[in-house]
Amino acid sequence: MTIIKDEEFGGERPLFASHGLRLENVTVHAGESALKCCSDIEASHCRFEGKYPFWHTRGFRITNCVFTPGARAALWYSQACVMKDTVVEAPKMFRELEGIDLENVRIPDAEETLWHCRDIKMRDVEVARADYLFMHSANIDIDRYRQQGNYSFQYCSNVVIRNADIDSKDAFWNTRDVTVYDSRLTGEYLAWHSENLRLVRCHISGTQPLCYCRNLVLEDCTFDADADLAFEDSEVRATVNSVITSVKNPRTGFIKARSIGEIIIDGNILEPTDCKIETES
């Protein structure tokens, strides 16, 4: 493997089509596509300032690096990315990637990030300003995760999340086969139109959660007082270890809660209209 150390590059495609390359304490200044069409790349303690540094790259490991805002759209159309102990200030990171392993990564501007990606593993990752995060991605495994940003995980499938704090309006819309354990989910209109969503020991906040769902399962969850008008037109099996402020027109299944402030069943309820609702008081 060729080692490049303590160097600076700029302009267009300075390391184009490189293979078997290790960068140590390297700065890539303004320009485009520094490492396009490369393979077997390692970068340690590097700084990326130019646009599109890793496009059409196969097999790269990034540790203790910084991607400045100028390095926008940095990793697209690539495979087998490992990133650890890194700060990503650049927006629109990770598109059309297969095989992503992130550990101890901060992304303070995660807008439109992780689109159309597959086989994602994340540990100890924190993201902010993350509007439209994870659009149309699949096979996602997340643990110890913190997120602020709306419209996340839309159209995702095959997702497992553990120990997360997700603050996101319209999260999990139109998802399939998602399971969330031991997490806090904050935001309005949670998981509308989802299929096969399972929430285990989660705390739910925000108005009108979990509506228009198919095969929705809640196990030992709790609801905040603002999580009202829940479960409209949903197929639901829910065990809730708290008060629910209000439930509206659940379609079928069962809801068990400590108590429910208001149960709204009106002429807008849809067939089969046989949801069983039980409370302790």
Image: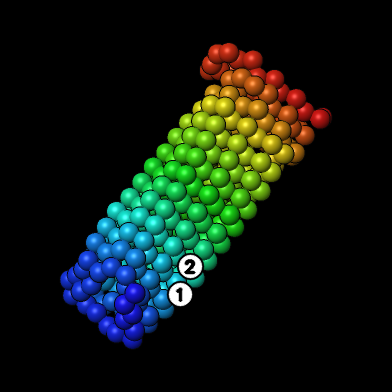
Q: Residue furthest right?
A: 281
Q: Is residue 171 visible?
A: no
Residue 171, which numbered label?
none
Which callout, 1 or 2, points at the residue further toward the start of the chain? 1
Which of the image's four quarters has the N terminus? bottom left
The answer for how far apart the CA atoms under marks 1 and 2 are is 7 Å
What residue is disc 1 on? Answer: 64
Local secondary structure at mark 2: strand
Q: Amino acid at mark 1?
A: Asn
Q: Is residue 250 visible?
A: yes
Which residue sits at x=32%, y=56%? 78
Of residues 71 and 77, the one nearer the viewer is: 77
Q: Amino acid at mark 2?
A: Lys
Crowding near pointer 1: few (<14 within 10 Å), some, many (20+)? some
Q: Position of residue 84 (x, y in %)?
A: 48, 67
In the rendered image, the vertical position of residue 245 relative to residue 84, given as above or below: above
Local secondary structure at mark 1: loop
Q: Residue furthest left?
A: 12
Of residues 270 and 246, the one nearer the viewer is: 270
In the visual, does 172 lie left or right of 109?
right
Which residue sits at x=54%, y=39%? 178
Q: Position of residue 231 (x, y in %)?
A: 59, 29
What residue is disc 2 on? Answer: 84
Which residue sits at x=27%, y=83%? 8
Which of the image's four quarters has the C terminus? top right
Q: Position of residue 167 (x, y in %)?
A: 54, 52
Q: Position of residue 85 (x, y in %)?
A: 49, 70
